[in-house]
Every structure is written in C-alpha cells, then in structure tokens.
C-alpha cells in the first residue's frame, strides 16, 4: 500500500508576537474605556463629597433654619461639585486635543 506524497510545506504563516500587557502592546479598549473609567471616578468623588455635609435639625427648628446653619458646608460642597463637574465636562475635550485631530 502506498501512501500519498507528503504535501509540500509552504511558508509558515506569519505570527504576531504575543501581546504583552506590561510591554505596551496590549489592546486596552481605547479612549472609550478610559473615558468610562474617568466618569466613574468623578462620580464617586462627587458622591463622597456630600458625606461631609451634616444638617442637624433641633426640635422646634425649621428645616430652613437648619439648612442655614449648614450653609458653609453646603457652599463648600456646591463649589467642589461645580469644580469636579467642570473637569468632568471638559475631560473628553482635553483627551481629543492631546491625541490630535485624527486620533493619533
């Protein structure tokens, strides 16, 4: 019984080197993933800010008066919220400016 001739081995298909996470070659999801992570970090920061605001309402005191006593804390929260909100609104714009007009 004869065996068919061995097929001619062609050139081995080109192989890309394995992707390395630490070497900088890995696909990390692009800018969309980074923007989503940044959004999450900023949302957590804004949420943590409100934990410092305490409104103590004593018996017989109106809510408006209690809020008035907490005015400095509420004002600091509002200023911090505004600052983080501005940074959040501008971070995709800053990213595009750093990458250039063609995303490179």
Image: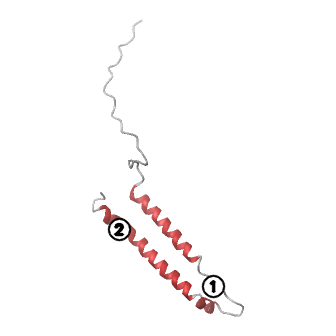
The quarter of the displayed image where residue 6 is located: top left
Tell me, for residue 76, which label it has, or none. Answer: none
- State which quarter of the image contains the N terminus: top left
Q: Earlier in the sequence, mark 1 or mark 2?
A: 1
Element under label 2? helix
Pinpoint residue 42: horizontal percent, then vertical percent: 48, 69
Q: Dot 1: within a 10 Å radius of its alpha carbon, few (fewer than 14), some, or many (20 or more) residues?
A: some
Pinpoint residue 46: horizontal percent, then vertical percent: 52, 73
Q: Which residue lies furthest to the left in this view?
A: 101
Residue at the (56%, 72%) spot, across then down: 48
The image shows residue 13, relative to residue 37, as above or below, that is: above
Q: Name the residue under label 1.
A: 55
Determine contact: label 1, label 2, CB under 8 Å.
no
Pinpoint residue 11: horizontal percent, then vertical percent: 31, 27
Q: Mark 2 points at which residue?
A: 94
The image shows residue 32, relative to residue 6, as above or below, that is: below
Q: 66 left or right of 103?
A: right
> What separation in Å lies between label 1 and label 2 (alpha carbons)?
37 Å
The quarter of the displayed image where residue 92 is located: bottom left
Residue at the (42%, 52%) spot, across then down: 28
């Amino acid at each position: 019984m004869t065996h068919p001739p061995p097929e001619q081995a062609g050139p081995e298909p080109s192989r890309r080197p394995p992707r390395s996470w630490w070497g900088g070659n890995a696909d990390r999801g692009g800018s969309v993933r980074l923007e989503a992570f940044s959004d999450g970090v900023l949302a957590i920061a804004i949420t943590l800010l409100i934990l410092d605001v305490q409104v103590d309402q004593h018996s017989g005191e109106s809510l408006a008066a209690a809020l008035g006593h907490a005015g400095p804390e509420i004002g600091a929260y509002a200023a911090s919220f505004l600052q983080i909100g501005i940074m959040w609104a501008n971070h995709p714009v800053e990213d595009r400016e750093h990458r250039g007009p063609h995303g490179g």
